[in-house]
Amino acid sequence: MSSLDAPSPIVPPRARERPIIIVGLAALAALALVLVPGLGLLSYPFRLLITIVHELSHGLVALLTGGAFLRFVVFADGEGVAYTVGGWRLLVIPAGYLGSALFGASLIHLGRSMRWSRAAMAVLGAALLLLSLRYGLPSIATVQWSSGVITVVAGLAIGTWWRFRPA
């Protein structure tokens, strides 16, 4: 008997309908945020977060392909611009959309576990703070300063993990 002929577990109809209902409600909520006046303020912080991730994705791919990431700017209306020099433009240009999609997929995946979702939020907060200071305000956070902070934070994180790692 092949694996195709093996009986499949019986799934109750309600269990199959539940994900469709959840996705439908999420789509209605997203539509309401866009169409209902005043509700757009609820999505404003998330729009800025996605813009930051979008612009940082351009910069990351520019750095990975041999270019330089000078800085990024996020405007109050949710638009942004990343200033990069060099790199492989064929990859740098679409990196913003791909990076945002991968970021969202990663958060959804990590959100399935309480432990990993908390760790992801802590890392996300620290990374956004450091990257915004380094690339959002390059005159305040020089390369030497941000490199030093990143080294200290990484050292503290590794040391804490090493000290309290499961036996």
Image (cartoon, rainbow, N blue to C red):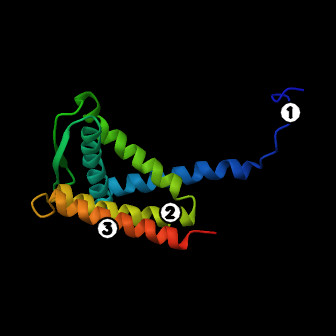
Check disc 2 and report the residue beneath it: 117
Residue at 64% across, 53% down: 18
Mark 1 against mark 2, which lies toward the viewer? 2
Q: Which mark is residue 152?
A: 3
Position of residue 29 relative to residue 2, above or below, is below
* Kind of residue indicated by mark 3: Val
Seen from the viewer's position, the closer of residues 9 and 167 is: 167
Give how far across and how far down residue 35 sits, in percent: 32, 53
Q: Earlier in the sequence, mark 1 or mark 3?
A: 1
Residue at 39% across, 70% down: 156
- Residue at the farthest left position: 139
Mark 1 against mark 3, which lies toward the viewer? 3
Determine whether label 1 and label 3 are within 8 Å by CB: no
Residue at 24% across, 39% down: 62
Check disc 1 and report the residue beneath it: 6
Determine whether label 1 and label 2 are within 8 Å by CB: no
Seen from the viewer's position, the closer of residues 96 and 18 is: 96
**Distance from label 3 to label 2 (Cα)?**
24 Å
Q: Earlier in the sequence, mark 1 or mark 2?
A: 1
Position of residue 62 relative to residue 122, above or below, is above
* Kind of residue indicated by mark 2: Ser
Seen from the viewer's position, the closer of residues 57 and 17 is: 57
Seen from the viewer's position, the closer of residues 73 and 63 is: 63
Give how far across and how far down residue 105 sits, in percent: 46, 48
148 relative to 161 in the view: left or right: left
Q: Quadrant of the N terminus?
A: top right
Helix, strand or loop at disc 1?
loop
